[in-house]
Image (cartoon, rainbow, N blue to C red):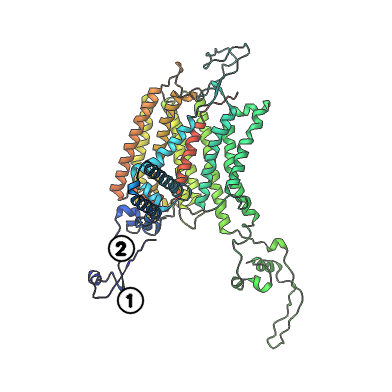
C-alpha cells in the first residue's frame, strides 16, 4: 500500500522542518506529516472532478493505482537480480576459464530467466491478476491493443482456420457425386419452394471426431472459462470444494463431449447433428451447469435459510435463542407466539406484592417448519439476481442466432430492409443490455451491486451486437448499403453520445425515475461505455477481416461457404466485402477519435484514461474481457459453419 503521508524524522531546527514549515504539514511528535504531491488529472480521470470523488465506483482504488510506483516490481525482480548477481560473480571469478562451457551456461541461464518471467507474467495477468502487472500492460496503447484487440481476434481466427478433414458428399440416388452448387430449380420441380440459406449449404462432409474433440471442444472450453471468470468477479466459487476446480471442469468437459456421441451413432437421431442450433443449445446447457451447481451448493448448505456464520454466544444474548435455549433463530419465536396469541398464559392481573413463583412446566416447542426463518439472506437474494443476469445474457445469444438465421434465409434484401434488420437488432440488444444493467446495478445496495460485472456484461452485449452486424457485411450488395449503415452508425454515435452525457439529460432521467445515480457516477458510466464500444468495434472488425482471408483462401472454404464468394449467380463479391469493410473500419476509427475528442473538450474527461483505470483497479477484468470476447467471436463463426458429417 503506498504511503499517503510519508513521515520525515528530525527536529524543528532541521532542514526538512524549515522546508515544510507551514500549516499543511503539522508536527506529530518528532515526525512531520508531509502530504504527497497532487496527482494530475490525467491520472485520476473523473476522480479529479469537483464532487466526483465518492460518487464514482472506483473509490480509493484509483488513487492506489495512480500512486503505484515500481516498489512491487522491484520486489518481484529482486530474486532474479540476486540470481544474476551470483551468476555474474561466479563468471568473474572464473574469467580466465571462459569458453564453450561459459556460453552454454549463460544461454541456459538466459533461457531459465525467460521461462521464469513468462510464467510470472501468465500468473500475474491471467491466473491471479495483479494490479501492478495489469497497469503496466494497459498503460501503453500498443500493449493494450495487443492484449485486448489482437489477442482475442488472433485466437478466434486461428480456431476457425484449423483445417478440417474433408470428404466428398455422398452420391445421389443415381450414383453421381453431388455438386457444390445445385442447378436452379424450375417452378414445377419439387424443390421450387426450397430456398438455400444465405450462409450456404454443406459442400463437403467433415470428420465428426475432429469436429467434436478439437473444434467444438475448444469452443466449450472457452465458454467454461468465461463463466468461471464471471464467478471470479462475483467472488464465488461455483465448483464443490470436495472435488476442486480441475476435477469438476474435467467432468463437465467429458459430459459436454460424450453426450453428442449417441446422436451421431444412432441413424435416426443423426439429423440433429447438422443443425448449428442444436450444438449451440447444448453449449447453452453446458454454460448453465456451473450456475446450477453453485445454486445447488447454496441450497444444500441452507444458505437461503440461515446466516453464513452462526451467531456467537455474545450475539445470542441479544436474541431470543439465548433465553429459550433454542438455536439462533431471530424472529421465528416472536412470530410463533404472535400467531398463538399467547394462548395458555394466565389471564389474571399481575400482583406486585405476590411471591415470585417459578414453575418447571415444559415449554411448548415450535414446529420444525416454523423454526426456519421466514426471510432470505441478502447474499442469497444477490446470487439469485446474478443468476438472472446470466440467463438474460445467454438468452441474448440465442436470440442473436435466431435473428441471423431469419435474415440469411430471406436474402437478398434492399437497403431499407437491411436498415430495418440492423436497427431492430440494435434495439433488441440495447433493451436486454438495459435489463441486465438494471439487475447488476453499479453500486452496493442495488440488486447485485457490482461495477466490474456491469463492465463485463456491457462488453458482452456491445460485442454481441457488433459481431452480428459484421457478419451482415458479407451480404451487402453495393457500396451504397455500406455508406448508409456507416453514416447512420457514426452520425448517431457522434451526436447522441455527448447529448446523453449532459446534466440536462441526466436530470430528465432522474425525474422519470430511470436512474438514481449522481451525475458524476452517470458520467463515469457513459465514459466507460465509450471505451467498451471502442474495444468491441475494433476486435469484431479485425476478426471479421481475418476470418474472411483465412476462410476464403484457406482449406476450410467449403466448410464455410458463407465466405466462398464463388457462385457466379450471387450478387456478393469478395473485393467489395473486404475493401468496403476496411473503409468502414477506418471510418469507425475516425468517428471514435472525434467522439473522444468531443468528450474531452466538452466534459474534460478522457475515455482512454477511464478505461485504463478500471482495468487497473479491478485486474480481474483483463482476463475476463479476453475470455468473453473470444467466446462471442467464436459464436459468430460457429453460426455460419455448414456441418455434414461422414
The residue at the far bottom in this view is 353
Identify whether 315 is placed above or below 396.
below
**Residue 371 image position (x, y, % from top left):** 68, 64
Helix, strand or loop at mark 2: loop
Mark 2 Cα-neighbour bin, 10 Å: few <14, some 14–19, many ≥20 = few
Depth check: give the residue in front, 108 or 428: 108
- Measured from the top left, where is residue 645 in percent x and y? 59, 25
Vertical position of residue 55 compared to residue 155: above or below: below
Of marks 2 and 1, which one's residue comes earlier in the chain?
Answer: 1
Q: Nearer the viewer, mark 2 or mark 1?
A: 1
Left or right: residue 405 versus residue 49 is right
- Which of the two residues, 149 or 326, is positioned nearer the viewer here? 149
Look at the image and tell me in which quarter the N terminus lies: bottom left
Residue matched to label 2: 36
In the foreground, 500 or 248: 248
> Which quadrant holds the C terminus?
top right
**Residue 62 x, y percent position in the rendering:** 38, 56
Count of residue discs: 2
Query: Dot 1 corresponds to which residue?
Result: 29
Residue 190, horizontal then vertical, whole percent: 60, 15
State whether residue 430 appears in this view.
no
- What mark, if any, has residue 211 been given in the picture? none
| 313 relative to 1, above or below | below
- Residue drawn at point x = 33 percent, y = 66 percent: 6
Looking at the rendered structure, the secondary structure element under dot 1 is: loop
Q: Which residue is outermost to the front?
A: 96
Residue at x 56%, y 57% (from the top left corner): 379
Amino acid at each position: 500500500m503506498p504511503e499517503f503521508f510519508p513521515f520525515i524524522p528530525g527536529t524543528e531546527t532541521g532542514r526538512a522542518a524549515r522546508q515544510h514549515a507551514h500549516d499543511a504539514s503539522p508536527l506529530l511528535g518528532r515526525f512531520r506529516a508531509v502530504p504527497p504531491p497532487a496527482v494530475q488529472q490525467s491520472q485520476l480521470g473523473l476522480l479529479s472532478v469537483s464532487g466526483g470523488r465518492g460518487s464514482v465506483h472506483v473509490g480509493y482504488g484509483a488513487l492506489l493505482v495512480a500512486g503505484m510506483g515500481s516498489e512491487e516490481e522491484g520486489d518481484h525482480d529482486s530474486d532474479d537480480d540476486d540470481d544474476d548477481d551470483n551468476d555474474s560473480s561466479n563468471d568473474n571469478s572464473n574469467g580466465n576459464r571462459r569458453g564453450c562451457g561459459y556460453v552454454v551456461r549463460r544461454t541456459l541461464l538466459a533461457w531459465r530467466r525467460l521461462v521464469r518471467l513468462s510464467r510470472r507474467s501468465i500468473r500475474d495477468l491471467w491466473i491471479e491478476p495483479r494490479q501492478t502487472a495489469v497497469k503496466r500492460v494497459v498503460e501503453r496503447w500498443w500493449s493494450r491493443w495487443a492484449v485486448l484487440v489482437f489477442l482475442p481476434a488472433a485466437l478466434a481466427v486461428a480456431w476457425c482456420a484449423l483445417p478440417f478433414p474433408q470428404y466428398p458428399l455422398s452420391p445421389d440416388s443415381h450414383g453421381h457425386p453431388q455438386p457444390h452448387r445445385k442447378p436452379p430449380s424450375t417452378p414445377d420441380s419439387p424443390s421450387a419452394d426450397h430456398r438455400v440459406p444465405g450462409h450456404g449449404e454443406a459442400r463437403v462432409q467433415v470428420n465428426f471426431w475432429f469436429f467434436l474433440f478439437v473444434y467444438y471442444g475448444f469452443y466449450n472450453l472457452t465458454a467454461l472459462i468465461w463463466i468461471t471468470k464471471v464467478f471470479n468477479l462475483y467472488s464465488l466459487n461455483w465448483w464443490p470444494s470436495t472435488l476442486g476446480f480441475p476435477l469438476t471442469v474435467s467432468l463437465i468437459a467429458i459430459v459436454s463431449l460424450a453426450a453428442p456421441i449417441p446422436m451421431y451413432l444412432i441413424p435416426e437421431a443423426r439429423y440433429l447433428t447438422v443443425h448449428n442450433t442444436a450444438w449451440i443449445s447444448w453449449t447453452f446447457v453446458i454454460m448453465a451447469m456451473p450456475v446450477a451447481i453453485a445454486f445447488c451448493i447454496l441450497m444444500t448448505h441452507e444458505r437461503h435459510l440461515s446466516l453464513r456464520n452462526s451467531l456467537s454466544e455474545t450475539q445470542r444474548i441479544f436474541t431470543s435463542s439465548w433465553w429459550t435455549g433454542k438455536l439462533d433463530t431471530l424472529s421465528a419465536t416472536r412470530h410463533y407466539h404472535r400467531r398463538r396469541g399467547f394462548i395458555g398464559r394466565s389471564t389474571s392481573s399481575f400482583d406486585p406484592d405476590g411471591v415470585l413463583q417459578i414453575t418447571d412446566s415444559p415449554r411448548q416447542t415450535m414446529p420444525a417448519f416454523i423454526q426456519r426463518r421466514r426471510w432470505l439472506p441478502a447474499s442469497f437474494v444477490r446470487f439469485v439476481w446474478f443468476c438472472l443476469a446470466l440467463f438474460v445474457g445467454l438468452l441474448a445469444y440465442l436470440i442473436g442466432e435466431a435473428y441471423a438465421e431469419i435474415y440469411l434465409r430471406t436474402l437478398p434484401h434492399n437497403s431499407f430492409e437491411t436498415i430495418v434488420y440492423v436497427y431492430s437488432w440494435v434495439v433488441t440488444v440495447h433493451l436486454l443490455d438495459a435489463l441486465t444493467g438494471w439487475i447488476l446495478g453499479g453500486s452496493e445496495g442495488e440488486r447485485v451491486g457490482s461495477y466490474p460485472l456491469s463492465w463485463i456484461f456491457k462488453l458482452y452485449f456491445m460485442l454481441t451486437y457488433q459481431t452480428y452486424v459484421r457478419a451482415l457485411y458479407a451480404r451487402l450488395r453495393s457500396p451504397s448499403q455500406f455508406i448508409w449503415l456507416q453514416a447512420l452508425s457514426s452520425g448517431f454515435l457522434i451526436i447522441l453520445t455527448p447529448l446523453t452525457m449532459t446534466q440536462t439529460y441526466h436530470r430528465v432521467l432522474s425525474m422519470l425515475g430511470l436512474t438514481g445515480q449522481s451525475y458524476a457516477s452517470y458520467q463515469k458510466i457513459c465514459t466507460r461505455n465509450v471505451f467498451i464500444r471502442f474495444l468491441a468495434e475494433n476486435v469484431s472488425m479485425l476478426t471479421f477481416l481475418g476470418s474472411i482471408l483465412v476462410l476464403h483462401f484457406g482449406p476450410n472454404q467449403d466448410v464455410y461457404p458463407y465466405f466462398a464468394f464463388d457462385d457466379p449467380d450471387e450478387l456478393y463479391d469478395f473485393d467489395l466485402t473486404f475493401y468496403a469493410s476496411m473503409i468502414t473500419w477506418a471510418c469507425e476509427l475516425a468517428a471514435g477519435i472525434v467522439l473522444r475528442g468531443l468528450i474531452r473538450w466538452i466534459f474534460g474527461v478522457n475515455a482512454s484514461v477511464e478505461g485504463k483505470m478500471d482495468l487497473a483497479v479491478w485486474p480481474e477484468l483483463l482476463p475476463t474481457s479476453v475470455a468473453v470476447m473470444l467466446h462471442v467471436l467464436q459464436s459468430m463463426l460457429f453460426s455460419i459453419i455448414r456441418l455434414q458429417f461422414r
